[in-house]
Image (cartoon, grey):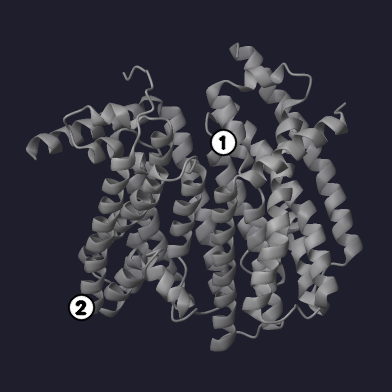
Amino acid sequence: MGGNIRYAFDMLKANMKAATSMRGAYLTRSIFNMLNHTIYLFMWVIIFDRIPSIGGWRVEHIMLAYGVGIFAWGLISFLAYGFRTLPRQIDQGELDIYLTQPKPVLLNIALGTTQTVGPAEIIFGTIILSIAGYMTGVSFLMLAFLAICCSIVFASLVLAYGSLGFWLKDFHGSAEEIYFNFFIMATRPEAVFSGWMLVIVLTVMPISFMTHIPLHALLDDSLPALVFAVAGTFFCAASAYAIFSVGLKRYESGNRFGVRG
Amino acid sequence: MVNPRKLYVFASTSFRDHMSHRLKLGVRFCMCVFFMFVFIEFWQLIARENLIDIPFPVADICWYTSLTQMMLFMSPRLFMTIEEDVRSGDIAYSLIRPMPYLWMRISEGIGNMTANTLVYYTLGIACVYVYIGELPSGGMSALITALFFLYFGSVLHILYQAMAGITALWLQDAEMAYRIYQKILIVLGGLYMPLTLYPDWLQTWAFLTPVVAMMFGPVQFVLGENSPLDIQTVVLLMICWFGFSVLLMGVIYRSCVARIEINGG
């Protein structure tokens, strides 16, 4: 266990070193990325300028949901970008390298590659969360805990849907689209999802465990909602791991020759 | 000069290729339908809560947001294809072909989009109709007019995707430029609500950009009597923005290709 943690830490250090090696490009990408998120948030400001509340949600609630979403997206891009590229890695037979190593396959997949904008998104998400947390007066400790839960749920969704690449060929493009749309969907006001849509967002597309239920626990100090959010996090993580494990048994080597430096 | 026959061949090949990828087509379509339903619920909720006085019939605004959402899903992610060409170096092989690279990719994008259009304009529209339960107040003619112009709006969107794609030659990553362009399209194009509900100063800004000709211009026909632009204005807007965009694309493309030569490919 200790060896795996040290290994993960070394991989992270290597990823960070790679990200900061081209400082100019790194800075440009980070600025563009923050600009992109700012424009999107601006749109919600315009909407809430016209409509005071949507199902009880105001601009600060959207900021909480969006902040948690960006934080999770950034964390995954930095710590588990390999989950996002899993379908491509499966198609190209790249898992061969990890299967022959003594370290856990999932750890290698997660940290095998990174996206340089990850840290910038984590910082931006934290800033948005701090502003929204101040506006809503919620507990910052609880907010941090739920942001971690949200990240685990999102990583689980990415892993579960990415693992479909074991069954479906050329799934990378579709999977990327699914992840992005999950993120966008999770930042919509909770009240929009009622009836059959609520069933969808609690089961096949469990984005409610990412934002809606944790925010309900946070804003209303609801213990049942908190228990539900934590249970949902465990359930999502376990389901994703199970899907990945079943899929991995179907994995066929690409017999691909290559050098990994 | 680009040979239109060559463009047609690339577009039709891409059309057939895209139609054969049923999984990709199906996943994207399902996501699109779900998003459209979410937007319908979003506006129906606002209407139910009665917090603001919506100056349109609810059904019209539901149709409006469904079509704007459809527009985003109809176009392929062309910028990714171009970025992949740049990253892999394949662009060097494409440039020496007797066919302008960018027009080749654009015609492929249009072929791809036409395949999507076929599915979205039939099954997608049927799903929206069943969910809303009625046609927009302008009737079938308003809907057909909107869909007709939306196709050309989507072609214009493809041109801007191509421009975002070739920025990969500078930044090694087209996604940054595309995401910013996409957010501008979402905000100033009126994805979530018609531009007429925006503050005046933002409407003025929006009308100075090409995104109005892509999204709000075509789709506002479903608002019936409340649609602020007539057909002639939308046609004029489209012609002007198409002309400007093609010129702009040419300038960006030439400066990018010159950059490849300077760097030695």
What is the chain identity of the residue bearing mark 2? A
Closest to the observer, A140 or B54:
B54
* Residue lying farthest to the right in this orientation: B232
Question: Is residue A92 shown left or right of residue A240?
Answer: right
Q: Residue at x 63, y 13 (%)?
A: B262
Q: Which residue is mark 1?
A: B174
Q: Which residue is mark 2?
A: A223
Q: Residue at x 40, y 39 (%)?
A: A85
Residue B259 in the image: state x and y as whole percent. 64, 19
Would you identify the image quadrant in which residue B89 lies? top right
Q: Residue at x 68, y 37 (%)?
A: B162
Would you identify the image quadrant in which residue B264 lies? top right
In the picture, which quadrant includes the N terminus of chain A? top left
Would you identify the image quadrant in which residue B94 lies? top right
Closest to the observer, A69 or A130:
A69
What is the chain identity of the residue bearing mark 1? B
